[in-house]
Amino acid sequence: MTSTGLVYMMTPALACFYGGLVENKNFLNQLFLSVVCMAIVPVQWCLFGYSFAFGPGNAVFGSFEYALQRKAALISVYGEYIDNIDTTTVSTFVLIAFECSFATLTPALISGAVVGRMKLIPYIIFVFLWTTLCYDPLARWMLFHEGWLYKMGIIDFAGGLVVHVSSGISGLVAAVILGSRAHFDPDVAITGSSNLPFTILGTGLLWVGWIGFNGGSALSANGLASLAVVNTNVSAASSMIIWMVLDIIVGNARGNTSNVITIRGLCSATIVGFVVITPAAGYVQPGYAILMGFIGGFIVYLFLDGKKRFFHVDDTLDVFSCHGLGGLIGTILSGLFCQTDVNSDVNNGAFYGNPIQLWYQLIGMFITCTYSAACTAVILLLMHFTIGIRIDRVAQVRGLDNIAHGVIEQGQPQTLQEIKMANMRKRMEESNKVATITIET
């Protein structure tokens, strides 16, 4: 129950984290996109989501048998066995709530890729459909003990594939389909970041929540849970360390001798460390968790550094980079470092004489990426050609806090003519700035 509360807290914490990274005109919109998942997904989960993911059925599909939790009091852990007397493992209602907190957080992660340019009603419909068609099947395949990928041998302790890779890939596909923001410039590495104290607050709350996210996935207050908590903490810490080192090295290489360490980058490094260790939190030694944090932080930092030159997709808050790429890295490293001596429920990894485990992880990555991308593309394209999903350019310039939520900010242009004039002035300022930089060089 404690872990359930901590993971539920992660969705508003994510809203704080994301909210501090967007422009002021979209601040409330980003909070809404995250928090509205707490209205949609729990209802879906109670209606049929839990039954689809953990109810009776086969290795691929669930059923409606546990819809509305009609038999919930008679089901033991993971919904696998009906027992009218003994439910001593984990109360079914606790499991329903715990798994619902994961299902709620996952589509909220996608919101960081579409903020500022997606209509509200299509977004709400997307969250409902994506949870039903994408998240629920993936959860059944990999988290349910009778799921076909679980029985194949793919390991994912707390949702590295199911939560982070699926949301990261879906965010990338959504960003491609929606197109770039009105003022998107791939040559500008950082935009927005209007309220970084909010991002720091969100990072701290996510840190606390991730203790329940990974620790609670042990489904018991035992040594495995404590191992997952330790691994979670040290992976995030090591990712932060390598990120700070790279900030200084790259800055000096580019002529900045002030040893600048960005707050935005440090907070992102923390999330990357969490994501990388999530699939392996209960399967590896703490020493490997430190190494995984270093590797994940290093690769994601370099990817983000080169993103503006080679990867011109407007993934607004780097959902793919932090969650998609981070989850893929963690899944691969899980296949290398996992040990039966650490957790008897898994086989040894490639470093301990079992290279087939790495192959299983690669299969899991391919299926998760392919299925998530296909589901997201089908849902969004259908809505795009029917009801429309993208906010028009003028509304984007004006900001969704005003257009979608009715908040008027003092000093912001409101009429079409004012918006056009403000846009023209901004372009002139940017062109003058570029010219000045060229002369100084």
Image: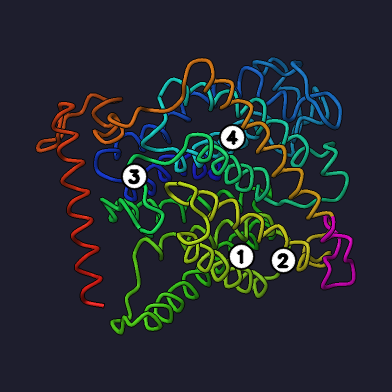
Cα–Cα span, label 2 and label 1: 8 Å
> Which sits in the foreground, 380 or 149?
380
Q: Is residue 2 left or right of residue 91?
A: left
Residue 128: percent from left, percent from top: 56, 23
Mark carried by residue 103: 4
The residue wearing badge 2 is 284
Cα–Cα span, label 3 and label 1: 28 Å
Is there a contact, CB below 8 Å, between mark 3 and mark 1?
A: no
Cα–Cα span, label 2 and label 4: 25 Å
Q: Earlier in the sequence, mark 2 or mark 1?
A: 1
- Looking at the picture, which amino acid does disc 4 mark? Ala
Q: Is residue 255 left or right of residue 169?
A: left
Is there a contact, CB below 8 Å, between mark 2 and mark 4?
A: no
Q: Earlier in the sequence, mark 3 or mark 1?
A: 3
Tell me the mark number nearer the camera, choosing from 4 and 3: 3
The residue wearing badge 3 is 19
Tell me the mark number nearer the camera, choosing from 2 and 3: 3
The residue wearing badge 1 is 231
- Looking at the picture, which amino acid does disc 3 mark? Gly
